Amino acid sequence: MPNHIHLLVEMRDDPISRIMQRLLTSYSQYHNRNYKKTGHVFQGGYKSIFCQSDQYLGELVRYIHLNPMRAKMVTRADEYEFSGHRAYLGMDASGLVDAEPVLRHFGGTRKRAVEVYQRFVEAGVGHRSRQEYYPTVEGRVLGGEGFLKEVTHRAGEHRGTLAQPIRVTIDELLRVAEGVSGLKREELCSNSKRRGTVAIKKAVIVLGRRNGIRGRDLAAALGVDPSAVTRRIDAARLREKENPEVAKLEAALRTEVT
């Protein structure tokens, strides 16, 4: 937009503060160098909303992509050249926008997802913008009561309410997981849908991230997409009490590794 930007970011390994610091600093340096300017480029700091993806993601994307129309800058959302909406529709091949994490919520195939997504965005034309997407307080949460409790719980984890991390490598983690589950590593790192395999794989993801292993490294070792690691760890944390493999694996890790 002329005086601000909206970014939809999926958090993985780095906190949003670090991502924004790198992005805004890099762009400021580029802008000042390219236009021979000095000083600040952005008037103020960023504000963020922590969004519950499965329930609120579509609404948030629609709000962002209809902004140029609501500001009367264009008559169609796909006419605005600086919007990620064009990438969602396959009209922008620059690669700057990864549309897949959002589109997968709209359909099983890309063609179907794009069709449903486009109809969803067009259905919002003419409706007034939603003020909850203009946060005035940093750290707002957009989600249901259960999601809010989970966010609060995870914030507590970052304040040190969990046990001390275990110094563990991916190889050590997988070796202990083999012993706990009785599965061979080939099975553990396969695409098997067996209930026991899925449960121990989720436990590996939860404990790997809890103890400092990067999501992309877990994804590579387990043979899954990095975005799948993010989805699985969120689901596994919400159901951790239902997955006894987490406690079993953590106990075995503390016995064998520490």
Image: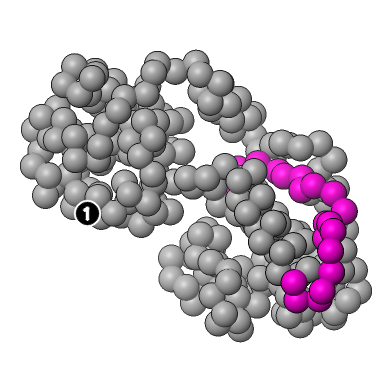
Q: Is residue 47 left or right of residue 15?
A: right
Looking at the image, residue 106 lies above or below residue 172: below
Image quarter hosting the N terminus: bottom right
Q: Residue 46: within the magenta?
A: yes
Please tell me which residue is depicted at 69% across the width and 40% down the height of the picture. Answer: 142
Q: Secondary structure at mark 1?
A: loop
Amino acid type indicated by mark 1:
Asn
Residue 95: image location, x then y, percent: 54, 75
Q: Is residue 24 visible?
A: yes
Task: Look at the magenta stretch and give its main secondary structure.
Answer: loop
Residue range corresponding to the magenta coloring: 33-55
Q: Position of residue 119 (x, y in %)?
A: 66, 71
Q: Residue at x 16, y 21 (%)?
A: 256
Residue drawn at the location 55% of the way across and 60% of the way down: 102
| Residue under numbered circle 1 | 191
Residue 214 occupies which quadrant of the picture? top left
The residue that appears at 39% across and 46% down in the rendered structure is 215
**Render colour scheme:** one colour
Instruction: Between residue 207 and residue 238, name the one nearer to us.
Output: 207
- Image position, residue 167 (x, y; %): 30, 28
Determine if the magenta segment contains residue 196.
Answer: no
Mark 1 Cα shell of 10 Å, populated few (<14), some (14-19), many (≥20)? few
182 w.r.t. 162: above or below = below
Q: Is residue 256 left or right of residue 83?
A: left
- Residue 250 placed where, x, y %? 27, 22
Position of residue 128 relative to residue 95, above or below, is above
Quarter of the image with the C terminus in it: top left
* Horizontal arrangement in the rendering, residue 110 relative to residue 146 (left or right): left
Outermost residue to the right: 72
**Quadrant of residue 249 within the rendered picture:** top left
> Quick check: 56 above or below 160?
below
